[in-house]
């Protein structure tokens, strides 16, 4: 972990795009700027950006910069193995996709009670620890989406876990479903460093509605993203805060306030609390658009996009969201009313949202 230079990382679940492909020219510029600014941590997984994230990193990072100049994290995701014998071949394919001989960090991805049981059956933790002993993994950890009790169970059963990646932002800090604070407290109890994902809650805390943004604008300081990321980074035991950056402007903004990091002061924390109160008055659907829910949907419903339409309608009350619902997000995918209530989406949702109930409300709003 001593090779990690600063507490801000390049999350590669969202990348600059040109149509359906990664804009590698823009990404190369972003990678170079990131490294030149003194940052060196990159986070990916096989399924990110439609399985294009790993190879984009090979093209834009690992083939262009010395191996000791960056720290690279990848993950073992439950979708890509069914038994213990599948893990090593998949791991080797990830090394090849990324163009490296080892990963600095390798995480058991999206751990929950259900996933943990599956990983245990397949001896995934044990296999990863064997790979670490062989030098193919430098540090072993987990990314986590469940209750604090489940996290405590995992860290108790596997004290070898060196780092935990959790969702942490000011909206989810005391949210009873996500339990960011409680999960952070479990990590502190076990003395396990924390990597933060979704500090801006899938962009919800970056592209703020006017009412929420006005609260932060009164501070006369940084961007909405700056307050969200600094909130996450300001807690004890935070090793790294990740941000998914899709253009150079976002990167330059983030680098500007994280290069000489300062935690939020009392006035800024008070403003953040006001933003939380404003959002909760709007009754918005707290979806982060991670898209885990869409992978197994038999009706191919683009659930996060439909929830985004619903939230936008609730905030802006205009016809534009109806257009996007009817002519963009449901043209090649199922409408909300197509839901067969199989429940696969809810089992995969890190936010534990009642997706089936919410889709009924979306259908009532948009499918008159």
Image: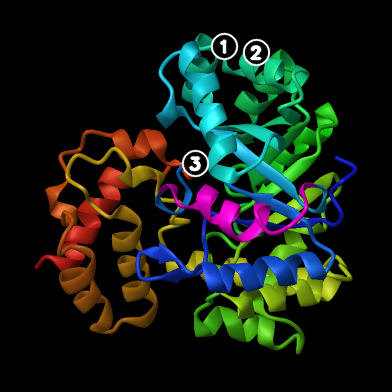
Residue range corresponding to the magenta coloring: 51-67
Q: Is residue 136 left or right of residue 26?
A: right
Image quarter of residue 198: bottom right
Is there any visible trace of residue 169 in the rendered image? no
Circle on res. 224 = none
Q: Secondary structure at mark 2?
A: helix
Above or below, 153 relative to 216: above
Above or below, 261 relative to 294: below
Tell me residue 341's x, y (percent). 20, 38
Circle on res. 123 = 1
Circle on res. 126 = 2
Give me the residue at 84% from left, 49% from top.
4
Give me the residue at 85% from left, 70% from top.
259
Tell me residue 119's x, y (percent). 53, 18
Image quarter of residue 166: top right
Q: Nearer the viewer, residue 134 or 305?
A: 134
Is the residue under label 1 in contact with that under label 2 (CB below 8 Å)?
yes
**Could you tell me how many numbered marks the image carries?**
3
Q: Is residue 294 left or right of residue 124?
A: left
Label 2, residues with CA under 10 Å away: few <14, some 14-19, many ≥20: some
Q: Is residue 20 left or right of residue 357?
A: right
Looking at the rendering, in which quadrant would you find the N terminus?
A: top right
For the residues carrying marks 3 and 2, which lies nearer the camera in this image?
3
Q: Is residue 283 left or right of residue 131?
A: left
For the residues carrying marks 1 and 3, which lies nearer the camera in this image?
3
Looking at the rendering, in which quadrant would you find the C terminus?
A: bottom left
Q: Marks 1 and 3, Cα distance to the nearest angstrom?
A: 20 Å
Label 3, residues with CA under 10 Å away: few <14, some 14-19, many ≥20: many
The furthest residue to the left: 368
Q: Which residue is mark 3?
A: 46
């Amino acid at each position: 972990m001593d090779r990690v230079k600063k507490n801000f990382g390049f999350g590669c679940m969202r990348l600059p795009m040109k149509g359906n492909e990664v804009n590698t020219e823009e990404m190369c510029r972003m990678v170079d700027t990131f490294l030149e600014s003194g940052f060196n941590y990159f986070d990916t997984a096989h399924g990110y950006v439609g399985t294009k994230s790993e190879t984009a990193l090979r093209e834009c990072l690992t083939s262009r910069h010395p191996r000791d100049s960056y720290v690279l994290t990848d993950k073992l995701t439950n979708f890509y193995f069914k038994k213990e014998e599948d893990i090593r071949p998949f791991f080797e394919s990830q090394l090849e996709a990324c163009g490296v001989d080892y990963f600095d960090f390798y995480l058991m991805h999206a751990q929950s009670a259900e996933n943990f049981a599956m990983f245990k059956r397949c001896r995934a933790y044990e296999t990863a620890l064997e790979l670490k002993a062989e030098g193919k993994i430098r540090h072993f950890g987990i990314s986590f989406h469940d209750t604090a009790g489940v996290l405590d169970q995992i860290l108790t059963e596997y004290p070898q876990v060196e780092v935990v990646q959790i969702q942490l932002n000011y909206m989810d800090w005391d949210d009873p479903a996500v339990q960011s604070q409680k999960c952070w407290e479990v990590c502190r109890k076990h003395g396990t460093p924390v990597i933060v994902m979704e500090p801006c809650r899938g962009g919800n805390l970056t592209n703020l509605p006017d009412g929420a943004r006005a609260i932060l604008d009164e501070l006369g300081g940084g961007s909405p993203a700056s307050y969200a990321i600094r909130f996450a980074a300001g807690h004890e035991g935070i090793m790294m805060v990740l941000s998914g950056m899709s253009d150079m402007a976002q990167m330059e903004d983030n680098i500007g306030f994280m290069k000489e990091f300062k935690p939020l002061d009392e006035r800024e924390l008070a403003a953040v609390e006001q933003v939380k109160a404003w959002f909760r008055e709007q009754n918005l659907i707290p979806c982060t658009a991670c898209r885990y829910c869409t992978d197994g949907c038999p009706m191919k419903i683009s659930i996060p996009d439909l929830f985004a339409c619903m939230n936008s309608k609730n905030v802006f009350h205009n016809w534009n969201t109806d257009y996007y619902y009817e002519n963009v997000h449901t043209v090649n995918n199922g409408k909300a009313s197509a839901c067969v209530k199989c429940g696969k989406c809810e089992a995969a949702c890190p936010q534990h949202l009642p997706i089936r109930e919410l889709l009924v409300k979306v259908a009532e709003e948009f499918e008159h």
